[in-house]
Amino acid sequence: MVKGRQTGQKALAAIAAATALVGIVAAGFGQRPQGTAQATLASASTATAQPSPYYSPKAGTLLNGVLAPLSSLRVMQRAIALAPEADVTTVPTLALLAAPLKTTGLGPIRIGMDLDELRAKGLTPVLIDEASNGQCQYYRIKDHGEPLGLMAINDQVLRVEVWPGSLTTTRSGIRIGSTERDLVRVYGQQLEATANPATLGKTVIFTPQDPGEDVYRLVFETDDQGRVTQFRAGQFPSVTWAEGCG
């Protein structure tokens, strides 16, 4: 068992430097679209999803050559995190990879904790300056390659965001690329939808009914083909702010 843990940790260390690049690239996806007009959820389209936001027509071949290995490295990390021999208590970023997003947080990250508590868990927040504004600030997690962000106000974490390219799912299995039909199937009448003119899709909000969770929400952003492009968990009302710290 100990040998297995050491092997998993060595493998993670070997790929951490390369996968850190993914977190840096993902920082550019902290912009939040607006949505105002009320709408009902439509059936999801079967059309092909839009090209990856990482794609650039001017350098498609180069990006494809770089991103495929990085994507594979994220899968490798996740496999290590989910392996029976892995000890996620000794490598905090493994705990993030192994955990689903819940209304109350992600793994050791809990909505409402402050940044010092986050550091005490072994997770180091790194400021995303271009997405921050005054006392409202965005962070990524140091040495964590997944495109995830934390929004904190006065150093208190109020939402966790999953951005394009992430493999993270909700506790019910919703992920980037899931459809509005999937959302209705999983969450049913606990959903509210608002038209999102910026994405030509919707902002879809799930309100939990579990005792003690009524102040939390899951929020999903969809595109014009009805597919989830990003999602987040957090405390109401800040989790519903379309532009985050904007």
Image: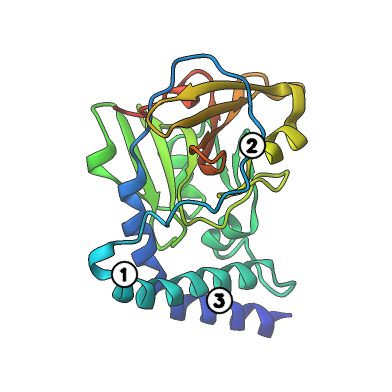
Q: Nearer the viewer, residue 86 or 129?
A: 129
**Local crowd size for mark 3, using a 10 Å CA cut-off: few (<14), some (14–19), many (≥20):** many
Query: Closer to the camera, 191 or 246?
Result: 191
Which quadrant holds the N terminus? bottom right
N-terminal-most mark, 1 or 2: 1
Please tell me which of labels 2 and 3 falls first in the chain. 3
Residue 235 horizontal/vertical position (percent) = 54, 25
Reply above or below: 22 against 171.
below
Check disc 1 and report its element: helix, strand or loop.
Answer: helix
How many angstroms separate mark 1 from mark 3 (CA)?
Answer: 34 Å
* Residue 18 x %, y %: 38, 74
Q: Which residue is mark 3?
A: 9
Q: What amino acid is found at the position of numbered circle 2 in the picture?
A: Glu
* Residue at mark 1: 60
Q: Give the residue at mark 2.
A: 180
Q: Quadrant of residue 149?
A: top left
- The vertical placement of 226 against 14, above or below, is above
**Mark pair 2, 3: CA separation:** 38 Å
* Residue plotted at (42% across, 34% down): 199
Name the kind of residue labelled 1 in the image.
Answer: Gly
Nearer-the-camera pick, 17 or 203: 203
Q: Secondary structure at mark 2?
A: helix
Q: Is residue 22 above or below residue 133?
A: below
Q: Residue at x 52, y 60 (%)?
A: 93
Q: Residue at x 51, y 68 (%)?
A: 74
Q: Nearer the viewer, residue 26 or 91?
A: 26
